Image (cartoon, rainbow, N blue to C red):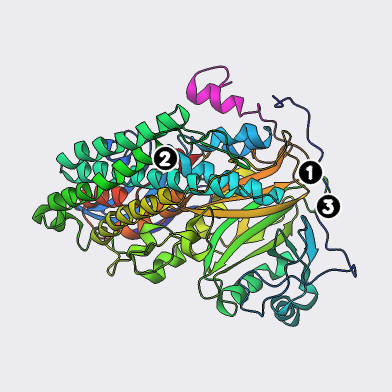
Amino acid sequence: MTNGPEEKQPPVPPQAAEGAATPVVPPKPAAAPPKPPAPPKEGPVALDNELVKRYRARFGEALREAWTDRKQAILVVSLDHLLEAAQFTRDDEQFDLLTDLTAVDWPKREKRFDLVLNLYSFSKNGRLRIKAQVGEGEPAPSVTGIWPTADWLEREVYDMFGIVFSGHPNLKRLLLPEEWEGFPLRKDYDILQQDDAWVRENLGIESGQ
Amino acid sequence: MGTTRIPGGVETTVLGADEIILNMGPQHPSTHGVLRVKLRLDGEKVAGSECVIGYLHRGVEKIAEHRNYQQFAPYVDRMDYIAAVSNGLGYCEAVEKLLGVEAPPRARVIRTILTELGRIASHLFWLGTHALDIGALTPLFYCLREREEILKIYENYCGARLTTHAFRVGGLQYEAYDEFEKDVERFCKEFDRRVNEYEALLTENRIWVGRTKGIGILSAHDAIAMGVTGPVLRASGVQWDLRKAIPYAAYDQFEFSIPTGKNGDTYDRYLVRMEEMRQSRNICLQAIEKIPTGPILGKVGKVLKPPPGEVYHSIEAPKGELGYYIVSDGTTQPYRVRIRPPSLINLEALDQMVRGHLVADVVAIIGTLDIVLGEVDR
């Protein structure tokens, strides 16, 4: 059992090694000519394929990084270009299904949150992950206008991480009670922590633990 | 009806005399758990709805960050407890991908059989309760009778009936028991006739057709925009199934078809799921013929320490796409586990589907979405 109060040390998020000797990994739905199987390699590998070139041509420096991890393509865009990149991803790159939208907390980092969009394209039968770094208190653009399914997903991210989405039609907590204080999936929210005042007032007990 | 501002700057809706708010749930027999739907009614017609969820929220994703990879595996069974094996399969395969290992062929085929039986069990439970909600009592007894046979196979296999924790990261813990193939075969041989029996009760039943045809229509375009997956998406005419699109386990070895609907209504979703049960049966019959010999557990070691990085892996659960997004920091505990629950995202489409229908149809539409609140709330 390891649910003690000690905090896990968040690692440095993966960086694409600049200029390292990196085998180019094809995008997942490889319609490209078959390549000899790359040696099994776990962990991030810098990515520079046609897809990345199209994003780079369109967004330039706003495309911060691109790498593959476990053969899955990941793009990092700057937050102020997220909406534009999302539109481009759906309309031009045909990633029409927003499979999932979530966040990861890296409290030691300058911008502590990663906003993560997992996308799927029916026509390419492939996946793509788009990330953007969000600082604490910094509003993120809502993608509900592009993928309506993001409505609840963004509400859940707001609920659990406290990331505010600008332009969201109905931003309120999804799973927790609306009056709840605190954002449970942040790393500094202890697993035993709860909103004691809410529990006392609404459940009439001292503690839910 | 109009909008006005109340103190605090909140925009609120002022209802006309003919609109009322009706609370359905959270304790309502047809919501299949603790789901609360606030319905805005114009007479008996639904003008809008809002789901209030979270009554079963247990913080599964938070718990994951404080357990090691093996310790967390039983927790996922408690999300969609109607098809617990699917949850386990998705999680184990995601961690295997993160580790860069693969389960041995024998384990993959046995996993496939158990998961397909789970799909049948899940669809049976859906059919029984869905029909019960609409007023057909009989199918429930038939469906639970056959589901019992599947649960017995699970019990013989691993000792548990519902939250089975049947799989382990890297393969299986238990070898198939001696009569396993025979039991599966006996069930499958019998099951074809049983599905025909259910269909005889419902498919051309005038009341059933009247209550389901044209109810809760979701077009293919809307379904994709709302992120809907699984049988609900296929009933809208999108022929997409992760077992074919991005095969996992041993699905690439077996032949089966992907049934689709045309109209995207409750009746088509019923037909799609009925056909899926038949296809699952076919997969099981093919699979027991060629279970390879060999080990059932790959070399994964006792302590799982995936290299830093992340992975997204998803499977076609009975309800839709069940995905796991796991971030590793190189320690024995996951840094972040995000579960993409099909029930939650399918439920999001409810509002769109109930508008313009009668209150009684809301019951049918909740039923046809096939949600499990344990998975919605996590």
* Amino acid type at image mark 1: Gly
Disc 2 crowd rating (10 Å Cα; few below 14, some 14-19, many 20+) is many
Q: What stretch is highlighted in magenta?
A: A190-209
The quarter holding residue B52 reads top left
* Amino acid type at image mark 2: Leu
Write down the chain letter for disc 2: B
Q: Nearer the viewer, residue B73 or B338?
A: B73
In the picture, measured across the screen, residue B55 lies left or right of residue B296, that is: left
- Residue B300: x, y in percent? 70, 41
- Residue B259: x, y in percent? 33, 64
Q: Which residue is drawn at 20% across and 39% down?
A: B142
Question: Disc 1 designates what residue?
Answer: B330
Disc 3 crowd rating (10 Å Cα; few below 14, some 14-19, many 20+) is few
Question: Disc 3 designates what residue?
Answer: A110
Distance from Cα at disc 2 to Cα at disc 3: 37 Å
Closer to viewer: mark 1 or mark 3:
1
* Amino acid type at image mark 3: Glu
Distance from Cα at disc 2 to Cα at disc 1: 33 Å
Question: Disc 2 designates what residue?
Answer: B373
